[in-house]
Image (tube, rainbow, N blue to C red):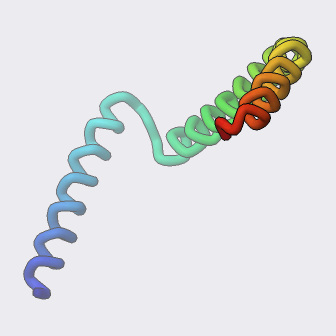
Protein backbone atom coordinates (compact mmCIF):
# COMPACT_ATOMS: atom_id res chain seq x y z
CA UNK A 1 0.00 0.00 0.00
CA UNK A 2 2.85 2.38 0.80
CA UNK A 3 4.35 1.88 -2.65
CA UNK A 4 1.12 3.06 -4.29
CA UNK A 5 1.19 6.23 -2.22
CA UNK A 6 4.88 6.69 -2.96
CA UNK A 7 4.24 6.39 -6.70
CA UNK A 8 1.40 8.88 -6.48
CA UNK A 9 3.54 11.38 -4.60
CA UNK A 10 6.39 10.89 -7.08
CA UNK A 11 4.02 11.45 -10.03
CA UNK A 12 2.69 14.62 -8.42
CA UNK A 13 6.22 15.90 -7.85
CA UNK A 14 7.26 15.20 -11.45
CA UNK A 15 4.06 16.74 -12.84
CA UNK A 16 4.50 19.79 -10.60
CA UNK A 17 8.06 20.17 -11.83
CA UNK A 18 6.96 19.97 -15.46
CA UNK A 19 4.16 22.49 -14.96
CA UNK A 20 6.50 24.79 -13.03
CA UNK A 21 9.01 24.69 -15.88
CA UNK A 22 6.32 25.52 -18.43
CA UNK A 23 5.05 28.39 -16.27
CA UNK A 24 8.59 29.74 -15.94
CA UNK A 25 8.88 29.78 -19.74
CA UNK A 26 5.96 32.22 -19.74
CA UNK A 27 7.43 34.26 -16.84
CA UNK A 28 4.63 33.27 -14.51
CA UNK A 29 5.67 33.16 -10.86
CA UNK A 30 3.66 31.48 -8.09
CA UNK A 31 2.84 34.86 -6.53
CA UNK A 32 1.64 36.27 -9.85
CA UNK A 33 -0.49 33.17 -10.43
CA UNK A 34 -2.12 33.48 -6.99
CA UNK A 35 -2.75 37.20 -7.49
CA UNK A 36 -4.30 36.49 -10.86
CA UNK A 37 -6.58 33.84 -9.38
CA UNK A 38 -7.78 36.23 -6.67
CA UNK A 39 -8.40 38.96 -9.25
CA UNK A 40 -10.32 36.49 -11.39
CA UNK A 41 -12.49 35.45 -8.43
CA UNK A 42 -13.21 39.10 -7.66
CA UNK A 43 -14.06 39.76 -11.31
CA UNK A 44 -16.45 36.79 -11.39
CA UNK A 45 -18.14 37.94 -8.17
CA UNK A 46 -18.49 41.47 -9.55
CA UNK A 47 -19.98 40.12 -12.80
CA UNK A 48 -22.53 38.04 -10.90
CA UNK A 49 -23.53 41.01 -8.74
CA UNK A 50 -23.84 43.23 -11.82
CA UNK A 51 -25.96 40.60 -13.60
CA UNK A 52 -28.27 40.31 -10.60
CA UNK A 53 -28.54 44.08 -10.33
CA UNK A 54 -29.52 44.22 -14.00
CA UNK A 55 -31.97 41.29 -13.85
CA UNK A 56 -33.74 42.06 -10.56
CA UNK A 57 -35.99 44.89 -11.86
CA UNK A 58 -37.09 42.69 -14.79
CA UNK A 59 -37.76 39.75 -12.47
CA UNK A 60 -39.91 41.94 -10.22
CA UNK A 61 -41.78 43.43 -13.19
CA UNK A 62 -42.50 39.98 -14.60
CA UNK A 63 -43.51 38.62 -11.21
CA UNK A 64 -46.18 41.30 -10.93
CA UNK A 65 -47.94 39.58 -13.84
CA UNK A 66 -46.81 35.95 -13.53
CA UNK A 67 -47.39 35.31 -9.82
CA UNK A 68 -51.06 36.40 -9.69
CA UNK A 69 -51.83 34.38 -12.85
CA UNK A 70 -50.08 31.35 -11.32
CA UNK A 71 -51.98 31.82 -8.03
CA UNK A 72 -55.35 31.97 -9.80
CA UNK A 73 -54.46 28.94 -11.92
CA UNK A 74 -53.39 27.03 -8.80
CA UNK A 75 -56.58 28.03 -6.95
CA UNK A 76 -58.75 26.87 -9.87
CA UNK A 77 -56.94 23.52 -9.98
CA UNK A 78 -57.32 23.06 -6.21
CA UNK A 79 -61.04 23.84 -6.42
CA UNK A 80 -61.40 21.25 -9.20
CA UNK A 81 -59.56 18.72 -7.06
CA UNK A 82 -56.49 18.55 -9.36
CA UNK A 83 -53.88 19.31 -6.77
Where's residue 81, x and y in %?
69, 38
Where's residue 75, x and y in %?
81, 31
Residue at left offset 11%, top offset 72%: 7
Residue placed most toward the observer, 49 or 26: 49
Residue placed most toward the observer, 42 or 24: 42
Where's residue 40, x and y in %?
61, 32
Residue at left offset 17%, top offset 69%: 8
Q: Spot the residue most to the bottom.
A: 2
Where's residue 63, x and y in %?
85, 19
Residue placed most toward the observer, 33 or 80: 80
Drawn side of residue 13 relative to residue 73, left or right: left
Number of disc labels: 0
Drawn side of residue 21 relative to residue 82, left or right: left
Q: Kindly indicate the quadrant of the structure image that contains residue 9.
A: bottom left
Residue at left offset 27%, top offset 53%: 16
Residue at left offset 71%, top offset 24%: 47
Q: Kindly indicate the quadrant of the structure image that contains residue 70.
A: top right
Amino acid sequence: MASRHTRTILRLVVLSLAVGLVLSLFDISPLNALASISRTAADVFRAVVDALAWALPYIIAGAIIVVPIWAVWRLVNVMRGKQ
